Amino acid sequence: MIQVHETFVCKPGNASKLAKKFKEAMAGLGEPVTILTDMTGQYNRVILVTQYDSLTAYEKNWEKYKENPEAMKKMETAMAGYQDMYLTGSREIYQTW
C-alpha cells in the first residue's frame, strides 16, 4: 500500500479556499481522498492524501482521466483558477507498513 501526499503552500488567505475547491472538484470521483489544512507547523498549507495498492495502481489512476474526456473537462472546470491560489507544491509517495 502506498500513500501519496500532495502539498500546496498557498498564498495567505487562500488555504481554505483551495481546500474547498479540491473538495468540490473531487466529490463524486469515487476515490478516497483526505484533504488536510494546517493547524500547527507551517502556515497556509493544503495537503491531499490518497492511497493506492501499488505504484502501478497510482499510475493507472492517472490513465483513467486520459480515457474519459468528460471527467477531465469537469475537473478542469471545477479547478479553474487554482494555480493563482498557491505559491509552490510538492508530491511525496510513502510506502505504508
Image (cartoon, rainbow, N blue to C red):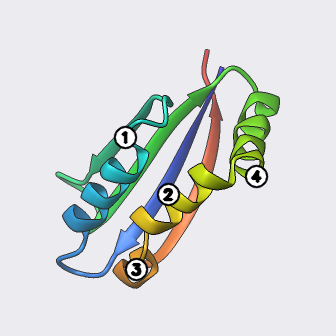
In-front residue for pair 6/31: 31
Q: Tell me which amino acid carries mark 3.
A: Gly
Q: Give the label, 2 or 3, closer to the camera.
A: 2
Quadrant of the image containing the C terminus: top right
- Which secondary structure lies at badge 2? helix
Secondary structure of residue under mark 1: loop
Q: Would you say 34 lies left or right of 90 here?
A: left
Of circles 4 and 3, the one toward us is 4
Tag 4–tag 3 contact (CB < 8 Å): no
Assess disc 1: are there few (<14), some (14-19) or many (≥20) residues with their C-alpha within 10 Å of its C-alpha: few
Kind of residue indicated by mark 4: Lys
State the image quarter where residue 61 is shown. Answer: top right
Seen in the picture, residue 44 relative to 30 is either above or below; the reply is: below
Expressed as whole percent of the image width and height from the top left, the position of residue 8 reads: 43, 65
Q: Which residue is mark 4?
A: 66
Q: CA distance from mark 4 to mark 3?
A: 21 Å
3D distance between C-alphas at marks 2 and 1: 11 Å
Amino acid type for the residue under numbered disc 1 = Ala
The residue singled out by tag 2 in the image is: 74
Answer above or below: position of 27 versus 88: above
**Judging from the image, what secondary structure is the residue with disc 4 in?**
helix
**Residue 43 visible to the viewer:** no
Residue labelled with disc 3: 81
- Which three-letter amino acid code belongs to the residue tagged 2? Lys
Q: Crowdedness of circle 2 by 10 Å Cα count: few (<14), some, many (20+)?
A: few
Q: Residue at x 39, y 53 (%)?
A: 25
Question: Which residue has dot 1 on it?
Answer: 27
Q: CA distance from mark 1 to mark 3?
A: 18 Å
CB-based contact (under 8 Å), mark 1 and mark 3: no
**Label 4 or label 3, whichever comes before in sequence order:** 4
Residue at left 22%, top 80%? 12
Q: In the rendered structure, which disc, 1 or 3, sits on the residue that comes first in sequence?
A: 1
